[in-house]
Image: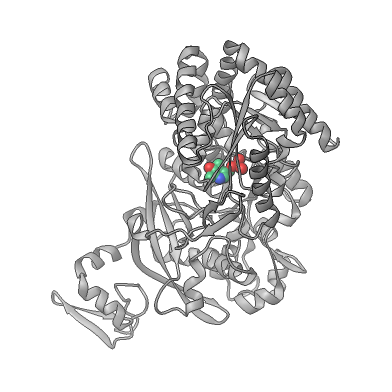
């Protein structure tokens, strides 16, 4: 009896709660667990058997957000989409991975915009039970000296060959936890620093413990997708603590850890004051050790992960370079991001590829053969995707976009450095181009983080401009940008526009989604576009290094006026040739199948 495990939650049973079932006596940790068992003993006993796949998994992938599909609101943007695409490709490629994230019962938020463009954030109502399977296993962590119980949910992402990757969602919303602790897994990027640090404790430390509890005992690599899960390194250090000097086995932990950094500016890295860390986490490892690996003045999650990972990478070649400058002395490699080809290809292009490049979804490298697809077929598939978008816009936003007009798309997080308003730097010039060279219309979408006031102003500015320019240049801003809308816009416009402030775009992925649908990019030469742009072949660049903003804008207008719009309206063959090269050169490379294979060979190989 002593040391007996509760079959419902896996905690140590106290002995006072017992139940006889089929000649066997079961002990429970609480009345609650006992009642749950009595309700349906068979299904509990089945659940408590360890998932058979757990023993064979060797890679654990930790991410603060994962985008699985539009109905599971556990993501906010690029980081989550990348995580979802990574998991999907691992499932297709049979990479033995298990993924860990948080549940977020209230999601990120659902965006509503009034007619001035004021953003309203509404909690997302969703029922995890509709999409995830609750697991009975539980683990505990300490937050501010309170014991917090974590439970888990599971979702399986199935690949094209039937292999699947489980995603474990951690959840603290349990009656046994305090009201504050129950809310810790409600919101993604909500709350204050204290809330954020608590979430990172749940993800990093709780996640590692939950994997152990679930029987994942053959993990050879812990992959941290961004620094949010960095505390996991401390849990691994503690697990390997020795009785005698040297007590700390840094090398063993480094062998286990892989870290992908996503931020090219110092302000973007997660940092916590040691006072806060002491208050929330306590003395988890001695502070002299923590400061040695996490930074002297502040606990810098990037530094922590850097110091305790054997393999570290940035998410594009340029970003690798920037990261090496930011953290001199660390061997930081780069693996350029991708997107999951099948997920981001519109239905009309899926049909086209199925016909001309059978097997493309399993082997997206074969998209290189897009050059041999007849031009009129490419155009037909594009027109179908464009019709779907324009119909959606006209139905939902009532703006009256035109199927024939050159359509420019911009779907991004609304935040200053992404510069959604950049294309309107010189409105008169833009109007002039539309009047003399060829008509244009715009589709925008993107959420601003609830506390990003300048980002919210940006949305209002686009709304204001759309009213100013009405009938001369139609502009629509669609509400609630999510992965479904993302695919609709990136596949349905004629040109994908990207105008971030250099060097803030670590990689960017939406232009890769566009490329999978034959949509070329016009983009500032930053992030992935430095690698993806072949001028006049896969799209066009805007690149005025060290020059004032006006020059960048001028280059944008010059290209729209002199090359892009005339080609679209008057040289359709040439235009379609560019579409084909976007697919053949860029979609065939900037996909997560290639990316995951690089992770496997550069860092996972065990
Ligand atoms: C792809 C995607 C992103 C990331 O796009 P970037 O080009 O990297 O900014 C963000 N949000 C959604 C909904 C997406 O589909």
Q: Describe residue 86's horizontal placement relative to residue 358 as left or right.
A: right
Q: How many marks?
A: 0
Where is residue 169 shown, x and y percent of the image? 44, 60
Task: Locate residue 555, reporting x and y percent.
Answer: 78, 27
In percent of width and height, residue 334 lies at: 66, 41
Tell me which residue sits at (56%, 16%) in the image.
Answer: 576
State the residue at coordinates (74%, 65%): 295
User: Is 13 left, or right, of 105 in this rendering?
Assistant: left
Relative to residue 292, is residue 541 depicted above or below? above
Quadrant of the frame with the N terminus: bottom left
Relative to residue 176, is residue 427 depicted above or below? above
Residue farthest along the bottom direction in this orientation = 16
- On screen, residue 322 above or below 427: below
| Observer-nearest of 436 and 483 | 436
The structure residue drawn at horizontal position 27% and vertical position 85%, both measured from the top left corner, is: 17
Q: Quadrant of residue 49?
A: bottom left
Q: Is residue 187 above or below residue 374?
A: below
**Corner quadrant of residue 497:** top right
């Amino acid at each position: 009896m002593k040391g007996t495990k509760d079959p419902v939650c896996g905690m140590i049973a106290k002995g006072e709660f017992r139940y006889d079932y089929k000649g066997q006596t079961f002990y429970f940790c609480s009345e609650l667990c006992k009642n749950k068992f009595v309700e349906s003993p068979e299904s509990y006993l089945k659940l408590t058997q360890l998932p058979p796949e757990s023993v064979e998994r060797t890679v654990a992938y930790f991410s603060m957000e994962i985008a699985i599909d539009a109905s599971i609101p556990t993501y906010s943007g690029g980081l989550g989409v990348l995580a979802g695409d990574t998991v999907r490709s691992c499932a297709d490629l049979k990479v033995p991975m298990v993924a860990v994230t948080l549940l977020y019962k209230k999601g990120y938020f659902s965006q509503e915009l009034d007619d001035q463009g004021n953003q309203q954030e509404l909690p997302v109502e969703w029922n995890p039970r509709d999409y995830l399977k609750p697991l009975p296993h539980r683990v505990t962590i300490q937050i501010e000296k309170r014991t917090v119980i974590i439970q888990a949910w599971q979702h399986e992402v199935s690949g094209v060959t039937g292999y699947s990757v489980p995603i474990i969602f951690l959840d603290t919303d349990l009656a046994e936890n305090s009201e504050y602790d129950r809310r810790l897994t409600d919101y993604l990027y909500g709350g204050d620093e204290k809330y954020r640090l608590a979430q990172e404790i749940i993800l990093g430390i709780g996640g590692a413990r939950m994997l152990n509890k679930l029987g994942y005992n053959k993990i050879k690599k812990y992959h941290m997708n961004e620094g949010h899960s960095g505390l996991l390194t401390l849990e691994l250090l503690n697990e390997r603590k020795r009785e005698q000097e040297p007590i700390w086995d840094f090398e063993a932990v480094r062998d286990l850890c892989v870290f992908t950094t996503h931020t090219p500016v110092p302000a973007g890295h997660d940092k916590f004051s040691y006072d806060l860390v002491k208050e929330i986490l306590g003395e988890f490892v001695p502070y002299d050790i923590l400061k040695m690996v996490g930074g002297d003045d502040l606990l810098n999650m990037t530094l922590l992960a850097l110091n305790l990972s054997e393999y570290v990478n940035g998410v594009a070649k340029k970003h690798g370079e920037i990261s090496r400058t930011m953290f001199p002395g660390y061997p930081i490699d780069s693996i350029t991001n991708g997107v999951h080809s099948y997920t981001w290809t519109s239905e009309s292009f899926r049909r086209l590829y199925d016909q001309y490049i059978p097997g493309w979804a399993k082997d997206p490298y074969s998209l290189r053969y897009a050059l041999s697809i007849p031009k009129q077929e490419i155009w037909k598939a594009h027109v179908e995707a464009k019709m779907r978008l324009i119909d959606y816009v006209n139905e939902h936003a009532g703006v009256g976009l035109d199927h024939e007009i050159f359509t420019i798309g911009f779907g991004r997080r609304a935040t200053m450095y992404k510069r959604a308003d950049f294309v309107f730097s010189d409105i008169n010039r833009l109007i002039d181009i539309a009047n003399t060279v060829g008509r244009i219309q715009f589709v925008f979408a993107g959420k601003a983080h609830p506390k990003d006031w300048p980002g919210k102003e940006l949305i209002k500015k686009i709304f204001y401009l759309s009213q100013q320019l009405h009938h001369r240049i139609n502009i629509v801003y669609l509400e609630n940008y999510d992965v479904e809308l993302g695919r609709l816009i990136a596949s349905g416009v004629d040109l994908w526009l990207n105008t971030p402030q250099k060097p803030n775009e670590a990689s960017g992925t939406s232009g890769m989604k566009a490329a999978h649908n034959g949509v070329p990019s016009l983009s500032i030469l930053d992030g992935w576009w430095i690698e993806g742009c072949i001028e006049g072949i896969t799209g066009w660049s805007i690149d005025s290094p060290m020059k004032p903003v006006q020059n960048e804008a001028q280059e944008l207008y010059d290209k729209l006026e002199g090359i892009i719009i005339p080609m679209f309206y008057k040289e359709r063959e040439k235009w379609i040739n560019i579409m084909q090269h976007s697919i053949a050169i860029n979609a065939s490379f900037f996909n997560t199948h290639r990316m995951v294979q690089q992770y496997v060979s550069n860092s996972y190989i065990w």
